[in-house]
Amino acid sequence: MLVAAIDTATPTLSCALLELRGGEVEVLTTRTDRQAGPGVGHGIRLPGALTDLLAALGRKVPDLEGFAVGLGPGSFTGLRIGLATWKGLAYANRRPIAGVSSLAAMALEAAAALPPGSDALLVPLLDARKGEVYAGFYRAAGGGVAAVRPEEAIAPEAVASRIEGLGMAFGFGEGFAAHAAVLGPLLPHLDGAPDTPSGDAVGRLAAPRLDAAPFDDRALFALEPHYVRKSEAEVKFPNGIP
């Protein structure tokens, strides 16, 4: 089963093609592009990233048999572009689609950087702007990851209270780097962990729900970004625009 996986939660666009074979997952090819500057966002780069990966394998969009997408949290605009594109392709080609947490995808990739046998808490962090970070709290479990606490948009200082009593913990991600002065004394950085979510980790996390799954239009229409916090419009106009 040929699956296209993507994450657009950050300015970094990450796309991957994976082959699913009865529980086994093979990453065929990946592409990660950092935003070159203003006006060069996901909407411009995304179509070419996918078609380039397919062309490298001698394949085309109709050959895709499933779609995996990172749902965030992250950039509201980036998430909408990625999800809308993948939902459109899945609907047009009648293919199954599955969404996963972008922070969980980071945790899955980071688990490989833990010392052998470690069950330390993985704390992926993305920069949420406005003096906050998007934070996830995961442990490696059964080849995947399991959430220990709900994901949140919180002040960097608040991470300390969230990990209290949960044992050894490691932080990582662009959110850690953006607030290293605060977060560094609270928890050690996990070397070798990702700064942003990768498409191949999104695909590996979604694989159990995609392998041999049928097309389900109701599930497709119900798939929404995981924003975690309210948008600026919702904050300013909680009762709608007068």
Image: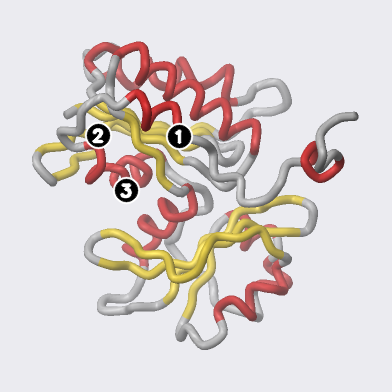
The earlier-in-sequence mark between 3 and 1 is 3
Q: How far, Cα to Cα, is label 2 from label 3? A: 12 Å
The secondary element bearing badge 2 is classed as strand
- As shown in the figure, which amino acid type bears the numbered disc 3? Leu
Near mark 2 (Cα within 10 A), the count class, few <14, some 14-19 or many ≥20, is many
What residue is disc 1 on? 223
Residue 52 visible to the viewer: no
Which sits in the foreground, 206 or 55? 206
Tell me the kind of residue under disc 1.
Answer: Leu
Q: Position of residue 124 (x, y in %)?
A: 51, 61
Query: Disc 2 vs disc 3: which is toward the camera?
Result: 3
Give SS at disc 3: helix
Q: Which mark is residue 18?
A: 2
Kindly report the distance in space between the C-alpha atoms of the residues bearing marks 3 and 1: 16 Å
**Among the 4 quarters of the image, the one containing residue 159:** bottom right
From this view, report whether residue 158 is shown above or below residue 38.
Answer: below
Using a 10 Å C-alpha cutoff, classify the residue at mark 1 as few (fewer than 14 neighbours), some (14 to 19) or many (20 or more). Answer: some
Residue 188 falls left or right of residue 15:
right
- Residue 22 quadrant: top left
| Left or right of 184, for residue 171 | left
In depth, the one of 25 and 142 nearer the eye is: 142
Q: Crowdedness of circle 3 by 10 Å Cα count: few (<14), some, many (20+)?
A: many
Residue 36 is situated, as x and y percent measured from the top left of the image, at 64, 28
* Disc 3 target residue: 205
What is the CA distance from the residue labelled 1 to the residue labelled 2?
Answer: 21 Å
Nearest to viewer (mark 3 / mark 1): 1
Give the quarter of the image for residue 91: top left
> Mark 2 vs mark 3: which is more N-terminal?
2
Is mark 2 in CB contact (under 8 Å) with mark 3? no
At a point 29% along the width and 59% down the height, the residue shown is: 144
Which residue appears at 80% of the width and 37% of the height? Answer: 233
